[in-house]
């Protein structure tokens, strides 16, 4: 595999950074608007847990894609098994898929869950502004669940990488999301 030019790496990093900003902005905007209307700590806690779980699941997928065997998915694609083509694509572009899953979605969900946790603490404290203890407890719980969940997910992902990516690939296939590996041009063939 040829070394990727530095400008392409920088360009991709800028695109990913901008995408992360836009994703964080959009999710924060929606979740803040939703939380402002919620008066139930249980509903706010449920939204918070969904965001934490999303980060854990995407981290698991991002780890699995770096440990999966591309040959397994090419064999599946050759036999026309559902998800074979998508799996081969995901593993071929593992660095970019892992970056999207681990860094963009995973880190954005962690940041947003912290902000929602602070809002949840205010909701629990009744908006009195005296929610320091609640904030500390909720933030610590979020950190513990996120880090513990990601640690458990990473172990599972490494041991079951092909199965995890196969599952994701079948979902993409069911959603009719076509991913394919095109022919890469290696220099000029005049």
Image: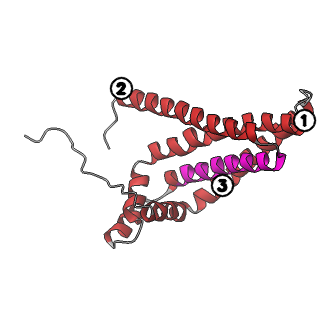
Tell me the distance, in whole angstroms, between the alpha carbons under discs 1 and 3: 35 Å
Which quarter shows the N terminus?
A: top left
> Where does residue 183 sit, x and y in percent of width and height?
24, 50
In front: 22, or 168? 22
- When asked about the image quadrant of residue 21, the answer is top right
> Where does residue 190 sit, x and y in percent of width and height?
7, 40
Mark 1 or mark 2: whose residue is earlier in sequence: 2
Residue highlighted by disc 3: 153
Mark 3 or mark 2: whose residue is earlier in sequence: 2
In the image, which residues are magenta?
40-64
Mark 1 or mark 3: whose residue is earlier in sequence: 1
Tell me the distance, in whole angstroms, between the alpha carbons under discs 3 and 2: 33 Å
Report the residue at 42% width, 59% height from top: 87
- When asked about the image quadrant of residue 117, the answer is top right
Residue highlighted by disc 2: 7
Residue highlighted by disc 1: 126
Do the residues bearing badges 1 and 2 touch, measured as CB atoms within 8 Å? no
Query: What number is the disc on residue 150?
Result: none
User: Which element carries disc 3, helix, strand or loop?
Assistant: helix
Label 1 crowd (10 A; few <14 / some 14-19 / many >=20): few
Report the residue at 70% width, 47% height from top: 52
User: Which element carries disc 1, helix, strand or loop?
Assistant: loop
The answer to whether residue 60 is magenta is yes
Is the stretch drawn in magenta largely helix, strand or loop?
A: helix
The residue furthest left is: 190
State which mark lies toward you, 1 or 3.
1
């Amino acid at each position: 595999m040829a070394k990727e030019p530095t400008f392409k790496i920088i360009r991709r990093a800028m695109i990913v950074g901008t995408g992360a900003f836009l994703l964080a902005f959009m999710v924060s905007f929606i979740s803040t608007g939703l939380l402002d209307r919620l008066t139930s700590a249980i509903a706010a806690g449920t939204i918070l847990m969904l965001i934490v779980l999303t980060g854990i699941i995407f981290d698991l997928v991002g780890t699995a894609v770096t440990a999966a065997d591309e040959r397994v998915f090419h064999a599946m694609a050759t036999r026309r098994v559902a998800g074979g083509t998508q799996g081969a694509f995901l593993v071929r572009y593992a660095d970019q898929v892992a970056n999207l899953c681990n860094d963009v979605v995973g880190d954005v969900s962690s940041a947003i869950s912290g902000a929602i946790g602070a809002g949840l603490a205010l909701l629990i404290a009744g908006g009195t502004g005296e929610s320091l203890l609640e904030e500390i407890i909720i933030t610590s719980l979020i950190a513990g669940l996120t880090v513990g969940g990601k640690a458990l997910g990473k172990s599972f992902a490494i041991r079951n990488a092909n199965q995890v990516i196969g599952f994701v690939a079948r979902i993409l296939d069911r959603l009719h999301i076509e991913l394919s590996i095109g022919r890469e041009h290696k220099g000029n063939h005049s």
